[in-house]
């Protein structure tokens, strides 16, 4: 549901930086992504630079006095950090946004002329509980807590146990530094892939020490791989290209590592059928990528399907810890056997679930 939006600027908060972006910039992007149009910014002060609004070429009107409101209108103030998912849920309910802890927030859908005190119009509206990050901003003193809440909300449905409890926390310090630099998430994705290829080179050397270092460097690549998503979400720099760059880069690294492990084992004199195993693993990764892409292209209405959940449960680098352990005990043959066989079980399971879901959709007439 699309509604016009009015953002009332408070001089104390409009230009306030929340993770390197002004509050006003974040609000305009959130309203735009929620489908609000047109967007009007009310401010008697000069507006701060709006880097993400400019980058997305979001059109808005800036006025010095509050415009007339004749119908349902989304109204919010810069005393708030909110995400598009909550504004999108708020508009059809014609309600007032409330934080999960019960805090009343300065955002809601009002009708008729705006009162001098926005709270008077918001108070009688039905409450809509926020599901994303929704935090009041009283002034500069509250910015650190709001920034921590935003960082704390970052996660991915693709996160495995190692990502959740190690890779993402380990990369968070670097993420916070990079947020204040021109470094882009796509550049971080490329760096993660390059580090992963260095790991593959180390595995291919064929010595025990090199294999251990290869496993450690691969873990570093996994940390960087978690970092790029954090940076994209917190800086509002998500893009379709970035998503596919990340997915393809991961698979290139996986193929390189699996083949390199086989080469290293051959050089070290392993009696296992390392080349057939490595090729089986590499081919399985390619097929898995095709199947995963097929699943990710499914309609949004099918986003909670079994195949999507399986993809989310397995599309991570939790195996990197196992690789460190097996490299340390000089049992990389075990890893190669498990990968060469397991990757084919993975894509067959996903494909079977997709085909079953497609058949079910056709029988029920759903798109």
Image: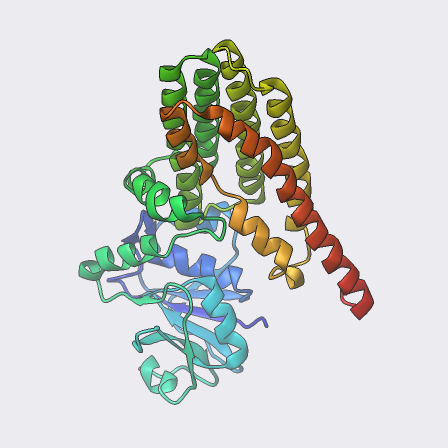
Which residue is depicted at the point 64% across and 21% down?
276
Q: Residue furthest front?
A: 271
Q: Position of residue 303 (x, y in %)?
A: 62, 59
Q: Position of residue 321 (x, y in %)?
A: 39, 36
Q: Which sits in the foreground, 256 or 23? A: 256
Which residue is depicted at the point 33% across and 37% down?
178
Q: Position of residue 205 (x, y in %)?
A: 45, 12
Q: Which sits in the foreground, 320 or 192? A: 320
Judge whether residue 16 can be spotted in this image: no
Which residue is depicted at the point 36% across and 44% down?
168
Which residue is depicted at the point 38% across and 83% down?
122
Q: Residue furthest bottom?
A: 124
Q: Position of residue 17 (x, y in %)?
A: 29, 52
Q: Is residue 91 above or below residue 18?
A: below
Query: Image quadrant of residue 210?
Result: top left
In the rendered image, which quarter contains the N terminus?
bottom right
């Amino acid at each position: 549901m699309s509604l016009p939006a009015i953002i009332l600027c408070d001089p104390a908060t409009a230009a306030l930086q929340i993770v390197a972006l002004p509050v006003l910039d974040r609000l305009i992007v959130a309203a735009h992504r929620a489908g609000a149009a047109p967007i009007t910014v009310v401010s008697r002060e000069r507006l701060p630079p709006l880097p993400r609004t400019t980058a997305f070429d979001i059109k808005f009107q800036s006025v010095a006095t509050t415009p007339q409101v004749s119908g349902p209108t989304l109204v919010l103030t810069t005393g708030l950090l909110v995400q598009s998912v909550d504004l999108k849920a708020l508009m059809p309910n014609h309600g007032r946004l409330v934080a999960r802890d019960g805090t009343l927030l300065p955002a809601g859908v009002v009708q008729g002329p705006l009162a001098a005190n926005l709270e008077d119009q918001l108070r009688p509206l039905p409450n809509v509980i926020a599901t994303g990050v929704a935090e009041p901003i009283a002034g500069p003193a509250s910015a650190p807590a709001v920034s921590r809440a935003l960082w704390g909300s970052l996660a991915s449905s693709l996160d495995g146990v190692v990502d959740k409890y190690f890779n993402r926390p380990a990369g968070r310090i670097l993420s916070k530094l990079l947020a204040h630099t021109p470094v882009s998430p796509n550049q971080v994705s490329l760096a993660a892939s390059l580090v992963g290829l260095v790991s593959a080179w180390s595995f291919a050397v064929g010595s025990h020490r090199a294999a251990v270092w290869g496993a450690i460097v691969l873990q570093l690549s996994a940390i960087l791989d978690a970092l790029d998503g954090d940076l994209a979400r917190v800086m509002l720099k998500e893009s379709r290209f970035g998503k596919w760059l990340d997915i393809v880069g991961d698979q290139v690294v996986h193929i390189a590592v699996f083949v390199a492990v086989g080469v290293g084992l051959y050089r070290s004199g392993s009696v296992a059928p390392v080349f057939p195993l490595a090729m089986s693993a590499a081919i399985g990764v390619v097929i898995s990528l095709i199947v995963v892409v097929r699943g990710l292209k499914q309609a949004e209405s099918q986003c909670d399907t079994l195949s999507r959940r399986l993809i989310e449960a397995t599309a991570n680098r939790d195996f990197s810890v196992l690789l460190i352990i097996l490299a340390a005990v000089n049992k990389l043959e075990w890893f190669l056997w498990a990968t060469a066989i397991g990757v084919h079980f993975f894509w067959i399971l996903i494909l079977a679930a997709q085909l079953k879901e497609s058949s079910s959709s056709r029988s029920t007439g759903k798109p």
